[in-house]
Amino acid sequence: MATKARNRYGGSIEHAMGSQFETDYKATQRRGLEMSDHLKKEIGDLKRDLAELQKLWSKLSPDCICFPENEQPSFDWPLEGDIAFSVKCPVHGDRFKWPVFFVYVSKWSRQRAENLRQRRSQQYKKAWETAFPPHLWPAIEEATADTLFLRLKDGTRIRVSEIVRKP
């Protein structure tokens, strides 16, 4: 039978070695968990960065017909918003947020709108012309006794509103 040597504190050397081993093992596990948590955070950050890069890259895709995020469209009539929203981007689907609160646009402002659109970015123009092709738009406003229409360049008439007359 082997005799157990004692350390200076009265405990056995085997006990002391066991304690040290347990302490080292627990510390290693703790470091492993810390490393694991750190790696999980790093992986999460990398996934987030990759998603942002994919989003940016897809916005630069020649197939993208979305309106730029900082240049959301404005429409003269709610019907125009419905038409534009019905056209989906082959890369992203919805090209802008709709419906939005619609504010009446006066006739003089509607007449200036086409000139203002020409000052927008190339991506905005691309997105606009996808829904409103230049061979059909801009439309000309026509009014009957009780209805307002937009007449496209090909002669098609689209009803945009009822005219309310005061008695």
Image (tube, helix red, strand yellow):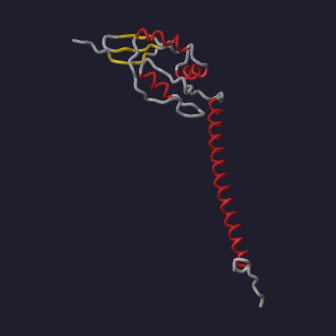
Question: Which of the two residues, 86 or 154, is positioned nearer the viewer here?
Answer: 86
Q: Considering only vertical position in the picture, is 15 above or below 164?
A: below
Q: Residue at x 52, y 19 (%)?
A: 132
Q: Position of residue 44 (x, y in %)?
A: 63, 47
Q: Is residue 166 left or right of residue 65?
A: left
Q: Residue at x 31, y 10 (%)?
A: 145
Q: Residue at x 45, y 21 (%)?
A: 80
Q: Position of residue 149 (x, y in %)?
A: 40, 15
Q: Position of residue 99 (x, y in %)?
A: 43, 29
Q: Is residue 20 left or right of residue 112?
A: right
Tally the numbered discs. 0
Locate the N terminus and report the quarter of the image it occupies: bottom right
Q: Position of residue 110 (x, y in %)?
A: 44, 12
Q: Considering only vertical position in the picture, is 140 above or below 66?
A: above
Question: Residue reaching furthest front?
Answer: 8
Q: Residue at x 55, y 34 (%)?
A: 93
Q: Is residue 6 left or right of residue 101?
A: right
Q: Which quadrant would residue 166 be assigned to in this image?
A: top left
Q: Considering only vertical position in the picture, is 54 above or below 133?
A: below
